[in-house]
Image (spheres, helix red, strand yellow):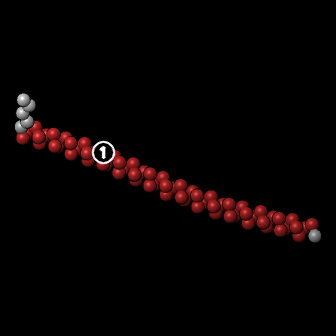
Amino acid sequence: MFQVTIRELFWFSAVAALAIGWMIHTRSEQTDDQFLQIQLMEQRLHEASQLVTQLQSIAKNNSDSAARQTE
């Protein structure tokens, strides 16, 4: 039959705790990276919407000035 000593239980517990801690840390870093990527994407989306608004106003001004010239 297999016998386990207290020392072996201690080492097994220590190795298991380190492995679980490492896994939790790795997932935490991945989550942080994903959060930063989402923030950058939101910032770029905001910048793109501002550019679209500016282009729309320029296009409107150009069409207004072209309409005035034809009159």
x and y percentages locating residue 66 in the rendered image: 87, 65
68 sits left or right of 10 in the view: right
Tell me the residue at 6%/41% (across/down): 6
The residue carrying mark 1 is 23
Q: Residues within 10 Å of mark 1 (few under 14, many from 20)?
A: few
Looking at the rendered structure, the secondary structure element under dot 1 is helix
Residue at the front extreme? 1
Three-letter amino acid code of the residue under disc 1? Met
Above or below 12: residue 47 = below
Q: Quadrant of residue 14?
A: top left
Above or below 30: residue 49 = below
Residue at the right extreme? 71
8 sits left or right of 66 in the view: left
x and y percentages locating residue 40 in the rendered image: 51, 55
Q: Quadrant of the C terminus?
A: bottom right
Q: How many marks?
A: 1
Tell me the residue at 45%/54% (across/down): 36
x and y percentages locating residue 21 in the rendered image: 26, 47
18 sits left or right of 43 in the view: left
Along the line of sight, the residue nearer the viewer: 41 or 5: 5
Q: Quadrant of residue 51?
A: bottom right
Tell me the residue at 11%/42% (across/down): 10
Above or below 60: residue 3 = above
Above or below 6: residue 41 = below
Q: Quadrant of the N terminus?
A: top left
Tell me the residue at 84%/67% (across/down): 65
